[in-house]
Image (cartoon, coloured by chain):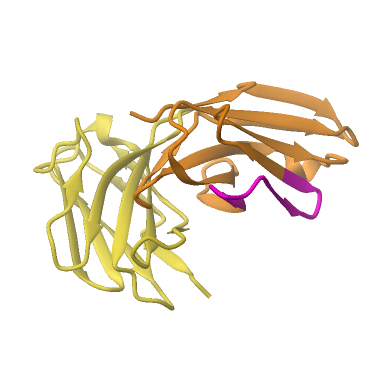
Amino acid sequence: KQEVTQIPAALSVPEGENLVLNCSFTDSAIYNLQWFRQDPGKGLTSLLLIQSSQREQTSGRLNASLDKSSGRSTLYIAASQPGDSATYLCAARDNYGQNFVFGPGTRLSVLP
Amino acid sequence: GAVVSQHPSRVICKSGTSVKIECRSLDFQATTMFWYRQFPKKSLMLMATSNEGSKATYEQGVEKDKFLINHASLTLSTLTVTSAHPEDSSFYICSASIWEGTQYFGPGTRLLVL
């Protein structure tokens, strides 16, 4: 059974810093891995999707990498801004293309 | 494109009543819809997967008689929380996809049972 963990659980940084969020999964037979952002009391916003055959994806200040062999993904946020404050979730989708297994999330606070 | 809506966004009900939450794919036909539940300060957990026209597949530990899922059309799935109790208070999110394609998430429904 796939298990997804995220480290750290919470992170507080000053504005302008670059930061890395970590995601680990136990079963490397994934279809894809996706990073989401969740604002308090809100739904999910998809940030980046990495297919199992890809190593990384970039969108603006965000870069996500995937290493299936080690069961890891990282989300790199460059030049953080207070508006980046949110909970970041990673989710692994199984090889049959069905449901996601979500990590517990990293709560990020970027201080002005 | 690929917008998924949920209604209502918030609902407060008395214990013992039933609550229906709708999930709609607005601009595409979703063959598969997923229902997730999020407990406070915890991650999302899949409750069930539903394919249009067939019975939903529930995850272990999810009571199918309590959480009724209907996926009657390619654009609508409903989750009914029957005889709701305070412990059912949670944030419910649906997602929709075309077969094994990208999942698009709804904005979520916050349920508070008094």
Left or right of A43, for residue B74: left
Left or right of A75, for residue B45: left
Left or right of B82, for residue A12: right
Quarter of the image for residue A9 reads top right
B69 vs B89: above or below: below
Does residue B77 appear in this view? yes
Q: As rendered, which of A96 and A108 lies closer to the eye? A: A96
Q: Main secondary structure of the magenta part?
A: strand
Tell me, yes or no, whether the highlighted magenta stretch contains residue A94. no
Write the start and end of the magenta stretch as one range. A48-63
Which residue appears farthest toward the bottom when viewing the image? B27
Residue B16 % position (x, y): 13, 40
**Residue located at (48% from left, 69% from top):** B3
Tint of chain B: yellow
Residue A73 % position (x, y): 62, 34
Residue B89 % position (x, y): 31, 36
Does residue B105 appear in this view? no
**Residue located at (27% from left, 73% from top):** B74
**Residue located at (35% from left, 44% from top):** B36
A98 vs A13: above or below: below
Quarter of the image for residue B75 reads bottom left
Which residue appears farthest toward the right when viewing the image? A16
Tint of chain A: orange
